[in-house]
């Protein structure tokens, strides 16, 4: 059965021990020169394996939206995604982009970046995680950083006030290394 073998290869690639893909493994890579085709290909393959295993469908428009967001480590607004879709013949109705983005966000393939009202592809699809986002205010580059130390500090400080933290979204705005350099240049 084709369906069976799809799922088999899917779970094989999901459980692959992670890999030499710096972009996926290392938050610093989001801001450094690297072979991004490798990250994008790896993340897309993981997403496809996950949808196959989860019984949901990556329709052509959902897949294309994910590909567009995977082109760079950068957040894009729904309107920018819609413009790209329209240019590629997917139609120019806003719900097309919004529905695809909602699906991808609900399934953990993209993160909402609230400060920018935008979306960024998740570099760790299928992993239960709530990262700290480092967001460049100049070029919209986004890196996901492990949040455990930040959460622990926040939880401890809140507990001192008798407050039990259930959910946090941590988004740090600033300048990425490249934009730091160009702002410092005369
Ligand atoms: Zn990359
Ligand atoms: Zn993520
Ligand atoms: Zn930047």
Image (cartoon, rainbow, N blue to C red):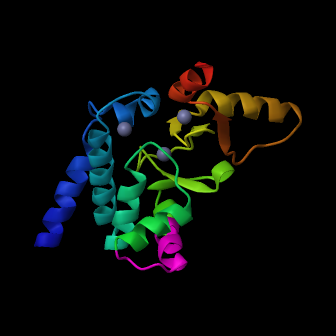
Where 72 falls versus 68 (above or below)?
A: above
Residue sitting nearer the eye, 69 or 122? 69
Q: Position of residue 136 (x, y in %)?
A: 59, 37
**Quadrant of the rendering where the C terminus is positioned:** top right
Q: Position of residue 147 (x, y in %)?
A: 59, 34
Q: What segment carries the magenta color? A: 89-102
Residue name at image x 72 percent, y 27 percent? 153
Q: Quadrant of residue 150?
A: top right
Residue name at image x 39 percent, y 57 percent? 68
- Inspect the magenta stretch and tell me whether residue 94 lies in it: yes
Is residue 43 found left or right of 116 in the rendered image?
left
- Inspect the magenta stretch and tell me whether residue 131 lies in it: no
Residue name at image x 39 percent, y 70 percent? 87
| Ligand 1 shown in quarter | top left
Q: Is any part of residue 57 visible from this angle?
A: no
Residue sitting nearer the eye, 130 or 80? 80
Q: Quadrant of residue 158?
A: top right
Most common SS among magenta residues? helix
Residue name at image x 67 percent, y 40 percent? 170
Q: Position of residue 26 (x, y in %)?
A: 41, 29
Where 182 falls versus 140 (above or below)?
A: above
Residue sitting nearer the eye, 131 or 84? 84
Task: State the residue lying farthest toward the left.
Answer: 1
């Amino acid at each position: 059965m084709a369906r069976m073998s799809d799922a088999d290869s899917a779970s094989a690639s999901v459980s692959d021990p992670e890999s030499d893909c710096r972009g996926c493994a290392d938050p610093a890579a989001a801001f450094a020169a690297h072979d991004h085709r490798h990250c994008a290909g790896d993340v897309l393959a993981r997403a496809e394996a996950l949808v196959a295993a989860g019984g949901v469908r990556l329709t052509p428009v959902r897949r294309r939206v994910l590909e567009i967001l995977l082109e760079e480590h950068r957040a894009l607004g729904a309107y920018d995604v819609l413009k790209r879709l329209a240019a590629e013949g997917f139609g120019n109705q806003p719900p097309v982009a919004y529905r695809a983005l909602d699906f991808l966000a609900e399934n953990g393939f993209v993160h909402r970046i609230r400060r920018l009202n935008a979306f960024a592809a998740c570099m760790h699809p299928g992993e239960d995680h709530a990262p700290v986002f480092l967001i460049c205010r100049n070029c919209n580059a986004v890196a996901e950083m492990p949040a455990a130390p930040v959460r622990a500090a926040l939880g401890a400080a809140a507990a001192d006030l008798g407050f039990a933290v259930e959910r946090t979204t941590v988004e740090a705005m600033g300048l990425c290394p490249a934009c730091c350099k160009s702002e410092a240049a005369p």
